[in-house]
Image: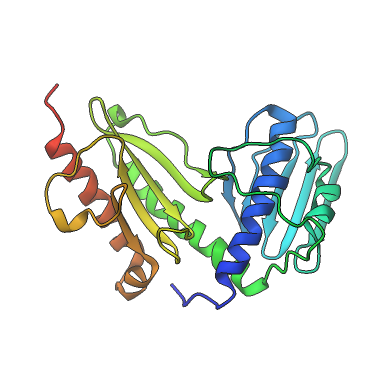
Amino acid sequence: MNDLPTTFTATRISLQRVAVHIIARRRHDLVGRFGLRATPGGLGSPAAGPEHEVVRTAGRWLVRERTGAEARTTALDLHAATLADAAAFAEVDLSAAFDVGHDTPPVGAVDAPLAVDAHASVALAAWYAFGVAVLDEVVSALDPSACPTVVQVWPEHFDAGCDVAAAPGTRVNLGASPGDGIHRDPYLYLGPWGPERDGDAGYWNAPFGAILGHRELRAAADPVVAGVAFLRQGLEQVRSGAPSS
């Protein structure tokens, strides 16, 4: 796991605007859903609509792929492009009301360059790939009764996450955030839906539960192993404090 480039936060903010107002809008226009996925090189939509359309990022590029009656791939450079350029590219209407939750980022200045940095966008893609690898490792080892949801990139907070049952009637959010107002750099998190905060009190270090930051993960001999252990510890602590069924 490498250091984050100095352009990481600015690029993250620009790419979230693209994720919400271009990629999620396009998927919603086609199928009425806006959940996204981590993809090679970035994030994007699952195939949707009659043209099996995917809109995704790959480094600083916005890529649109269609494999319906005709296979077509087009791309837009998000370094110099504006949000208005990206909207025209993906055929979305930025003036239409669109809401992915109470923290939906505003459209903002549609004619200002997005200035997506190549190195920072690669670092963001690497973070999502890391986070999904950790989540898959944790979820795959759970009992089927955990009923995990699908790992998705949620546009509102830009995190890759899912939720699972730590115990009957006790669900927990698991995820990988690329950074936000709570913690500037990327972090893994565990957030119980209820008041469960049992076990090691030092584990619960965030208003909503617990986080393990990018700096701590970088210092680990194996960041994936460290991330998996962090989430498993939280699940065990929640499980130990859950009411008996």
Is the residue 127 above or below the residue 30 in the image?
below
Residue 111: image quadrant is bottom right
Task: State whether residue 46 appears in this view.
Answer: yes
Q: Is residue 36 above or below residue 200?
A: above
Does residue 242 appear left or right of residue 176 in this picture? left
Q: Quadrant of residue 163?
A: top left
Residue in the image at 55% along x and 37% along y: 101
Image quadrant where one finds the N terminus: bottom left
Q: Does 200 sit left or right of 107 as displayed?
A: left
Image location of residue 14, percent across then percent down: 66, 60
Residue 181 is left or right of residue 76, and the answer is left
Image quarter hosting the C terminus: top left
Return the residue nearer the eye: 140 or 174: 174
The residue at 48%/48% (across/down) is 160
- Seen in the picture, residue 55 relative to 77 is either above or below; the reply is above
| In front of the other: 102 or 41 | 102
Q: Residue at x 75, y 68 (%)?
A: 79
Image location of residue 65, percent across then percent down? 78, 46
Outermost residue, top side = 245
Q: Position of residue 145 (x, y in %)?
A: 28, 27
